[in-house]
Image: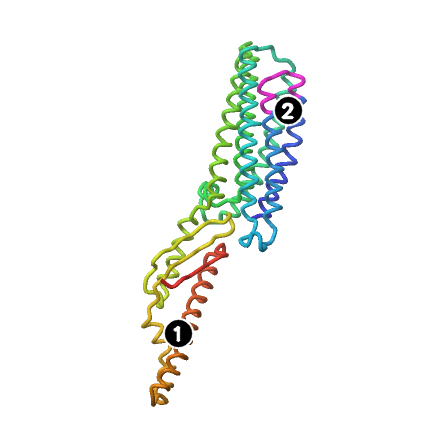
Amino acid sequence: MSEGSKLAVGSAIAGNTLISIGKFAAFGVTGSAAMLSEGLHSLADTINQVLLMVGIVRATREADQRFPFGYGAERAVWALMSAVGIFFLGAGVTIYHGISTLMHPHELEGLGWAIGVLIASFVLEGIVLMLALRAAKGAAGETPLWTHLRYDSDPGTVAVVMEDSAACLGVLLALGGIGLSHWTGNPVWDSVASISIGVLLGAVATWLISRNHQILVGPAVPDEAKLRIQQVLAANPAVEKIVRLRTRMLDNETYRVAADVDFDGQTLAEKLEGVLQEAYPGIESYEDFRAFAAEFADQVVDQLGDEVDAIEDEIQAIVPRVRYLDIETD
C-alpha cells in the first residue's frame, strides 16, 4: 500500500507545482480573487503533499528499542500537519482574500489566460486524482471505496484523493465565478467563488484532521477484521470462552490484538491422554506420583503454549495486518 501511496503523493507534488505556477501567473494578469484563491489552494496542496511524502518515508523505518511497535503512525502525524496547513494556509487565507475583494471589488482583465490555466489545471488535477483513486481501489480490494477511505486507507492516499477532489471542484467554482463576473459585469461573483473555495478547503481539512486524529488516538480495528479474529478463537476446540478482546490500529497497516481466553482443561487433558496412559503403570508410590505430576505440569504448559501459537498463526494468516498479538489465559 505504501508504494501506491508514494506514487499518488509524488504525482500530486509534481502536478500541483506546475499548477501553482500557472495559477499565480494568471492571477498576475487578471487580478482575479478566485484565481488567487486557486493559486493559494494549489500551493497549499503542494506543501501539504511534501509533508505527506516525509511521513511516508519516515514511516518505513524499522522498529527499534525506542519505538518497539514501529514508526507507522508517522504517516498520520505528518498527514495531520498537512491537514492543519490546508485549514490555515488554504482555507483561512482564501476566505480572507475573498472577503477583502468582496468589500473592495475591481474589474477583471485577461480572462482568456485565467480560463486557459483553469482548464489545464482541471486536466492535471484530474490525472492526479485518477492515480490516487487507482491506488486506493487497489488497496481496498473488495471493500467499498468510501468505506476504505474513511476507515482503512493510507493517510497519504486519502489526503491526495480528498485534496484533488476539492481541487477539481475548486477549479469549477473559480470558472463559474470568473464567468459570471464577466457576463454580468459584477465582480462580486469572483469574490463569492473565492470564499466558496475557502469553505470547501476548510471542510476537507476538517475531515482529514478528524480522520488522522482517530488514527493517532488508536481506534479499534475494522469490524470485519475483528469478526474474523473472534471466529478463529471461537472455532478452536481448546477455547472455552473469549473473556475479553481488545484491538487497536497502530497505523493503517499494523494492528495490535490482546485476547483474554478461558481454555478448556478437558480438551487439553484429552490431547495429553497418551502421556497419562504411558506414565500410569510406573506410578507405584507417592514420590513417583509427585515426579510425574511435576513433569505433567510442564507438559500441560507446553501444550497450552502450542495451542496459543497455533491460534496466533491462524489469526495472522487470516488477518495479516495483525503484527502484535497477545493471547492470555484468564
Q: For residue 27, which quarter of the picture?
A: top right
Label for residue 300? 1
156 vs 181: above or below: below
Mark sitting on residue 23: 2
Secondary structure of the residue carrying numbered label 2: helix
Query: What percent of the width, then of the height, locates residue 144?
Result: 44, 44
Percent position of residue 99, x then y? 53, 16
Q: How is the image coloured?
A: rainbow
**Magenta residues?**
26-38
Q: Residues within 10 Å of mark 1 (few under 14, many from 20)?
A: some
Whether the magenta-drawn stretch holds residue 238 is answered as no
Earlier in the chain: of badge 1 and badge 2, it is 2
Quarter the C terminus occupies? bottom left
Measured as percent of width and height from the top left, residue 21 is found at 67, 27
Can you tell which quarter of the image residue 9 is in? top right
Name the residue nearer the viewer: 64 or 278: 64
Which three-letter amino acid code belongs to the residue tagged 2? Lys
Q: Residue type at mark 1? A: Val
User: Could you say which is closer to the camera, residue 254 or residue 21?
Assistant: 254
